Image (tube, rainbow, N blue to C red):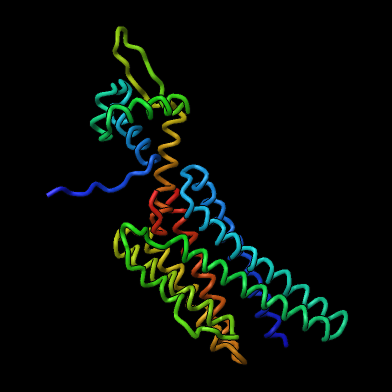
Amino acid sequence: MNRKRPYRSKMRILVDMMRAIQGEGEEGAGPTKVLYAANLSHDRLTQYLEELVEKELVIEKDQGGEARIYSLTEKGRDFLVEFVRIERFSEAFGIEI
Amino acid sequence: MQTEIMLIRIDLILETIGAIIAFAISHYANTAYKLTREKRLSDLSTGFLVLSVSMFGRVIGTIYFFVLADASGSGEALSLRNIVIIAYEALRIMAYALFALSTRRGVREYENNAPLMLLALPGLIDPNLEMIAIIVLLVVVLQALINYASNRSRFALYVVIGFLFLLLSHIFLIFSFNEYRGYILSQLSQFLGLIALLVMLIKAGR
């Protein structure tokens, strides 16, 4: 029997991606790691990674050749801390974000 | 007379502190809305802002009423007092309606929104605005309880306690006609409710 996946807002998806990147520490995470950890399709992954880089929440490091690694910026780390607070506040009132 | 003046002073102090707390919650909800673009956070922010404005308005109106009553006699002061009371009650009902709207569960998760349907009960036309406030706030408390029952978070518990005390404050107010104790209980209850919401705000922010 198929279990219906709960709907994720775009904000939630971006946060899941950032948490996946943060989980890899200073070394950063490659796109495949983010893809599986955040449970995304490839098209969405590319689109959202570009958005995160554009918003300066994530930085892309070129490892030579085709390899790309993504790490959180200081702004990205601060954003995640603030998001946790907002998440707690919103869920206290029954508002899902 | 001395007791009345002392009560009014305490009442105004508690109301002012409560208004500041409501404003702080509104500000944080607005910050959360700007970050997440979740509309219900904007509704919540507006609700607490309206509550804060109503409380500040009552403080200013009450002070002005007593100054005016001193200076010019009873007629003008009485009509201002009535305006302040009606405006205060109407704004509070608006604030509670916004809380009910913003804290309702999503359609996907909770199709049978029974608490909100209470608002559609016919025949609830009552000249006493307090009754309307109680009914709307009852919906808010029920929604908060349902939220707490589903996620069991301590932050949700603080919200339940906060709104419950606000509801109690209105219930006590009904029994306060010609009875100071009811009025004191009402104001204390309102203050405690806002303190509970402030505690939630501080703990969630850590």
Q: Quadrant of residue B173?
A: bottom right
Numbered circles on residues, count: 0
**What residue sits 60% from the left and 63% below the top?**
B50
Q: Position of residue B1 (x, y in %)?
A: 73, 88
Figure check: B157 above or below B79: above
Figure check: B107 above or below A5: below
Q: Position of residue A50 (x, y in %)?
A: 41, 24
Relative to B155, is A66 on the left or the right?
A: left
Q: Nearer the viewer, residue A81 or A63?
A: A63
Q: Quadrant of residue A76?
A: top left
Relative to B109, is B119 on the left or the right?
A: right
Relative to A45, is B132 on the left or the right?
A: right
Figure check: A22 above or below A8: above
Q: Nearer the viewer, residue A15 or B183?
A: A15
Q: Position of residue B86 (x, y in %)?
A: 67, 77
Q: Nearer the viewer, residue B161 or B51?
A: B51
Q: Residue furthest bottom?
A: B178
Q: Residue furthest top?
A: A65
Q: Position of residue B68 (x, y in %)?
A: 83, 77
Figure check: B142 above or below B124: above
**What residue sits 48% from the left and 73% below the top?**
B137
Q: Residue furthest left?
A: A1
